[in-house]
Image (cartoon, rainbow, N blue to C red):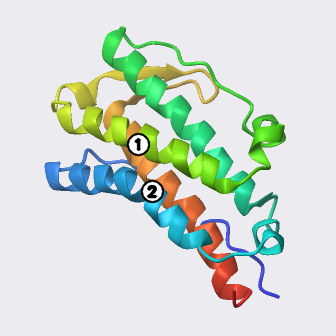
Amino acid sequence: MTTPPKYPAGERGSFTTPTVAEREAMIDDIASLAANLRKAIAGLSAEQLATKYVNWDSKRIISHLADSHMNAFARFKFALTEENPTIKPYKQWEWSLTADADTDPELSIALIEALHARWVVLLRAMTDSDFQTTFYHPEPNKTYTLAEGLHIYAWHGKHHTAQIDWMRQNYSW
């Protein structure tokens, strides 16, 4: 069997300030994540959903996306309403071990769908200046602009969806 690639959707790449068209494409990626996840798991059996891509199975991958993007949405709201707020990191691995992470992935997809619908409204209303507002992340000791945050989370959804797609292709599901 082939070893799963670390970045099945490709590496995120370094950040450059996006053009308006590039920013719109990233917002479209956020908008389409729930539909892409539904497509990725369509018709998979319980056994297939429980197959791990390195450390997480599809249910936990999707739960992680919901957890991560809830935090991201809050980070955007804090950055838009406070001066360079320090965000609260969370223990992603430990969150992936809670009972709600090992349940019907449709619960997490529905959460992503609703969350992203609101997030897209917010993103499409933001000005160029809004995308330059910042938050501070204490783990990497780095300040991020919201444009960088958009870049990270648009890629993040594609990255984890590609993990599920990779399993479908390589296991011939």
The structure residue drawn at horizontal position 84% and vertical position 72%, both measured from the top left corner, is 47
- Identity, as a three-letter code, of the amino acid under mark 2: Leu
User: Decide: marks 1, 2 in contact (CB < 8 A)?
Assistant: yes
Residue 170 visible in the current orientation? yes
Q: Is residue 141 left or right of residue 20?
A: right
Extreme residue in the top direction: 83
Q: Identify the image quadrant of residue 5.
A: bottom right
Q: Is residue 93 left or right of residue 33?
A: right
Residue 13 visible in the current orientation? no
User: Can you identify the residue that label 1 sits on?
Assistant: 116
* Residue 170 horizontal/vertical position (percent): 70, 86
Q: Nearer the viewer, residue 143 or 88?
A: 88
- Identity, as a three-letter code, of the amino acid under mark 1: His
Mark 1 vs mark 2: which is more N-terminal?
A: 2
The structure residue drawn at horizontal position 75% and vertical position 31%, both measured from the top left corner, is 91
Q: Nearer the viewer, residue 31 or 17?
A: 31
Q: Nearer the viewer, residue 155 or 42?
A: 42
Where 95 falls versus 133 (above or below)? below
Crowding near pointer 1: few (<14 within 10 Å), some, many (20+)? many
User: Can you identify the residue that label 2 sits on?
Assistant: 33
Crowding near pointer 2: few (<14 within 10 Å), some, many (20+)? many
Where 105 falls versus 46 (above or below)? above
| Alpha-carbon span between mark 1 and mark 2 | 8 Å
Q: Secondary structure at mark 1?
A: helix
Q: Is residue 124 left or right of residue 142?
A: left
Report the disc number at residue 152: none
